[in-house]
């Protein structure tokens, strides 16, 4: 009888262990969740709403009863913005820009703790606006169009310095001003100025052409005067015999000239001399 009781107790204990195991497994299944994190993001783990840890890439399990997951992207992203600013000469300018940025993967927890998931609206956009409205007034509109690359570099460096000094852990990868929009009156003035400059350039080219033609006329007149002086000097010094022979050679058409005898000599007949 005692042996039978011991056997029953062992069976009951075994059954209870199985029940406990099943209960634990069910509890684990009910309260354990899993999440997969890829290379382009990090998972912020919150325990009762407070930051606990950060999950890196891979498969992770966590207690769904006490913990929750918030995913933060760490890949490079684009933030397009448009802000109104003033120019150096007090013109109103609308500046459009593209900012490439990413969150530091090693500091995702700090970014979430400080700014939550709205860190772009909370810290990045205000710093972009602050940068644009502080650098744009240092240029007149013409310089904005001519020195855009310089402005891009200055704004990128300024924005980076502002974010670093605020310990935001948001890294700037690039800054590009995509456009400057000026007032209608200013655009009209620019167009009129360009037309005036083009007309002035055209008139300047015409004047240069006239000056060149006048210079050519003067040079030709001087050459003709010099040639005439040489001819007169030749005629005066040599009675003109060599000069007349030269003119005859210049007018000769390659045919033998007509001949006329006279005083036992052959005299060429030179037409036009």
Image (tube, rainbow, N blue to C red):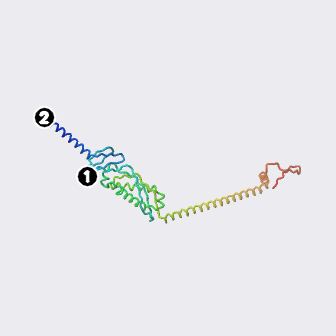
Q: Mark 2 points at which residue?
A: 4
Q: Nearer the viewer, residue 267 or 25?
A: 25
Report x, y in % for residue 104. Answer: 34, 50
Q: In which quarter of the image is residue 21?
A: top left
Q: Is residue 15 above or below residue 102?
A: above
Per the rendering, the mark at residue 48 is 1
Q: In the rendered view, does 202 fall on the left or right side of 168?
A: right
Q: Which residue lies furthest to the right in this view?
A: 263
Report x, y in % for residue 7. Answer: 14, 35
Q: In this view, does 184 lie above or below 22?
A: below
Report x, y in % for residue 100. Answer: 40, 52
Q: In the rendered view, does 33 fall on the left or right side of 254?
A: left
Image depth: mark 2 or mark 1 in front: 2
Which quadrant, please, contains the N terminus? top left
Q: What residue lies at 75% left-to-right and 56% top-to-bottom?
A: 231
Q: Nearer the viewer, residue 15 or 167?
A: 15
């Amino acid at each position: 009888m005692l042996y039978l009781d011991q056997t029953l107790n062992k069976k009951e204990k075994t059954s209870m262990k199985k029940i406990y195991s099943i209960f634990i497994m069910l509890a684990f299944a009910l309260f354990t969740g899993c999440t997969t994190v890829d290379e382009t993001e990090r998972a912020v783990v919150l325990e009762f709403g407070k930051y606990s840890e950060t999950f890196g890439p891979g498969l992770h399990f966590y207690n769904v009863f006490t913990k929750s997951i918030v995913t933060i992207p760490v890949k490079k992203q684009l933030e397009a913005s448009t802000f109104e600013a003033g120019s150096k000469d007090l013109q109103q300018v609308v500046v459009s820009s593209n900012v490439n940025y990413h969150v530091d993967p090693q500091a995702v927890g700090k970014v979430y703790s400080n700014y939550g998931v709205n860190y772009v609206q909370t810290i990045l956009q205000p710093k972009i606006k602050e940068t644009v409205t502080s650098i744009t007034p240092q240029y007149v509109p013409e310089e904005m169009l001519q020195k855009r690359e310089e402005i891009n570099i200055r704004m990128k460096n300024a924005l980076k310095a502002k974010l670093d000094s605020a310990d935001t852990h948001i890294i700037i990868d690039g800054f590009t001003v995509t456009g400057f929009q000026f007032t209608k009156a200013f655009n009209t003035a620019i167009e009129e100025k360009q037309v005036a400059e083009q007309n002035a350039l055209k008139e300047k080219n015409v004047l240069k052409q006239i000056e060149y033609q006048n210079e050519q006329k003067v040079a030709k007149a001087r050459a003709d005067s010099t040639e005439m002086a040489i001819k007169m000097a030749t005629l005066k010094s040599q009675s003109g015999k060599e000069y007349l022979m030269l003119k005859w050679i210049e007018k000769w058409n390659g045919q033998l000239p007509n001949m006329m005898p006279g005083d036992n000599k052959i005299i060429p007949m030179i037409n036009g001399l």
